[in-house]
Image (cartoon, rainbow, N blue to C red):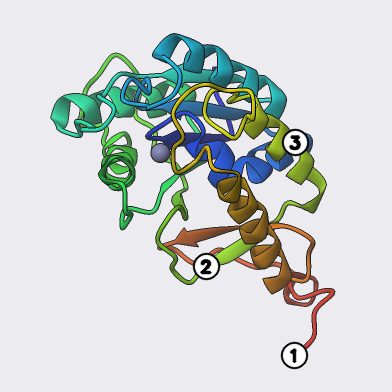
């Protein structure tokens, strides 16, 4: 199954929290989106890999993703050697995305940073014809990075005002992970209600930077082509 855009993250919920609004917007615009998680979440304080599998599939359905694939590179000590690189090369060659979206490799959580690096490298190597695997070579147009804990100046921001509700619905599918007053599980950094407040505030902040209600920020090593400079700044004024 080919897709237009492939999101490859370390943990289920990373994609939703950082750029779920963008994933939903792409689907709304008629594009095919695939989601890949490199770990099963076995190191999580709350929930089990089995409950998290059900939650992540429900979240994928909410976003309208064509599929969600869970690999097993090891949660909490994500392996990112040649064997794992070859698995990602296989995924890229099978689904032939135009864009790959993954964490920015300079990140607080080493699993995120390793994901950003191995996905960048594998996306390039997937295009090497001399690297023979069972599938034909394919190189995406670009690898784009989303931001998590560390902040860097974004290359561009996507207006996700129309799909912010879909994003928060997808996040709510992770019942075991986020704030639930009825839960008896231990509290964590992300189960504190302040965490989802922060996600909301960040969406509004990035949105404000482009004159929209909500935005999601991305970094790209290659600048995007802008076909309409005037529309790109519509609804804003010099500040
Ligand atoms: Zn994560």
Asked whether mark 2 and ligand 1 are closer than 8 Å, the reply comes as no
Tag on residue 155? 2
In the picture, residue 139 is in which quadrant? top left
N-term-proximal mark, 1 vs 2: 2
Residue position for label 3:
166
Locate ligand 1 by image quadrant. Answer: top left
Mark 3 crowdedness (10 Å alpha carbons): few <14, some 14-19, many ≥20: many
Residue 204, position as x, y percentages in the image: 70, 62
Q: Is residue 88 above or below residue 42?
A: below
Residue 13's place in the image compared with 201, above or below, is above
**Helix, strand or loop at mark 3:** helix
Residue at image coords 49%, 67%: 223
- Mark 3 or 1: the one toward you: 3
Q: Residue at x 65, y 59 (%)?
A: 201
Question: For residue 238, which numbered disc appears in the image?
Answer: 1
Q: What percent of the width, then of the height, locates residue 194? A: 58, 50
Residue at 58% across, 65% down: 156
Q: For this view, does 26 lie left or right of residue 56?
A: right
For the residues marked 1 and 2, what is the alpha-carbon distance in whole angstroms? 19 Å
Q: CA distance from mark 3 to mark 1?
A: 31 Å
């Amino acid at each position: 199954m080919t897709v237009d855009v492939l999101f490859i993250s370390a943990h289920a919920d990373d994609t939703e929290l950082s750029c779920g609004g963008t994933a939903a917007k792409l689907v709304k615009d008629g594009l095919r989106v695939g989601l890949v998680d490199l770990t099963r979440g076995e190191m999580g304080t709350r929930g089990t890999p089995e409950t998290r599998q059900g939650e992540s599939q429900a979240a994928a359905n909410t976003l309208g993703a064509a599929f969600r694939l869970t690999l097993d590179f090891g949660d909490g000590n994500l392996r990112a050697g040649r064997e794992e690189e070859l698995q990602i090369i296989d995924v890229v060659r099978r689904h032939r995305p135009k864009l790959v979206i993954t964490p920015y490799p300079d990140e607080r959580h080493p699993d995120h940073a390793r994901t950003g690096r191995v996905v960048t490298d594998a996306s390039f190597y997937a295009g090497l014809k001399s690297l023979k695997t069972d599938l034909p070579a394919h190189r995406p147009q670009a690898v784009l990075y989303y931001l998590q804990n560390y902040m860097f100046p974004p290359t561009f921001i996507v207006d996700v005002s129309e799909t912010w509700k879909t994003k928060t619905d997808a996040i709510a599918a992770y019942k075991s992970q986020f704030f639930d007053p009825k839960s008896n599980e231990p509290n964590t950094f992300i189960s504190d209600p302040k965490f989802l407040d922060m996600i909301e505030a960040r969406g509004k902040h990035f949105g404000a930077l482009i004159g929209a209600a909500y935005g999601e920020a991305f970094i790209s090593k290659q600048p995007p082509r802008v076909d309409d400079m005037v529309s790109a700044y519509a609804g804003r004024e010099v500040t």
